[in-house]
Amino acid sequence: MQGIAFQDAYPEELSHCYGCGKNNPHGHQLKSYWDGDETVAYFIPEPFHTAIPGFVYGGLIASLIDCHGTGSASAAALRALQDGGETDAEPPRFVTAALNIDYLAPTPMGVELELVGVIKEVKPRKVVVEITLSAAGIVCAKGHMVAVKMPDTMM
């Protein structure tokens, strides 16, 4: 997953997510990458993402944190597999088991949003990620995610 977005490494048949699926032309198309030991993604809200004039809808913020978190979980699990010697491992897909978001400041429209993920725990079937969402250098929201390996029934 070095150099390409985590979400672009997902298999075609599992790339339809509204938030990050490359095969969903109506979705956000969020792209997440490694930046050292942290993960990053950037997103510019559209006018239709408005809550009230000048500010971003909180549901969009939750969606971005959710998709950046599951992408980060996938990348962290793959990195752990590769560090364990599985050099041909494919990125495992993760889904949200728990997501808690604290909205800390109103998120302004018209600026690029930055998401930064910090991996807190990596287990074979579970990854814990903390995500911050900032606008113009101000942290507007923080998320705490427990992501679990996608069950076979979803594949």
Image (cartoon, rainbow, N blue to C red):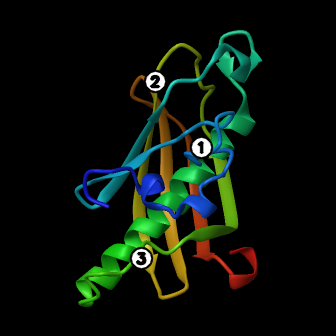
Q: Nearer the viewer, residue 25 or 76?
A: 25
Density class for disc 3 (Cα within 10 Å; few <14, some 14-19, many ≥20) is: many
The location of residue 26, given as percent across then percent down, is 69, 33
The mark lying in front, picked from 3 and 2, is: 3
Residue type, mark 2 in image: Glu
Of callouts 2 and 1, the N-terminal one: 1
Residue annotated with mark 1? 64
- Decide if residue 36 is on the left or right side of residue 67: left
- Decide if residue 146 is on the left or right side of residue 9: right
Secondary structure type for disc 2? loop
Density class for disc 1 (Cα within 10 Å; few <14, some 14-19, many ≥20) is: many
- Decide if residue 34 is on the left or right side of residue 109: left
Q: Is residue 52 above or below residue 45?
A: above
Which residue appears at 52% of the width and 64% of the height? 11
User: Could you tell me how far apart the alpha carbons at marks 2 and 1 are, in whole angstroms?
Assistant: 13 Å
User: Residue 152 falls in which quadrant of the image?
Assistant: bottom right
User: Could you tell me how far apart the alpha carbons at marks 3 and 2 are, in whole angstroms?
Assistant: 28 Å
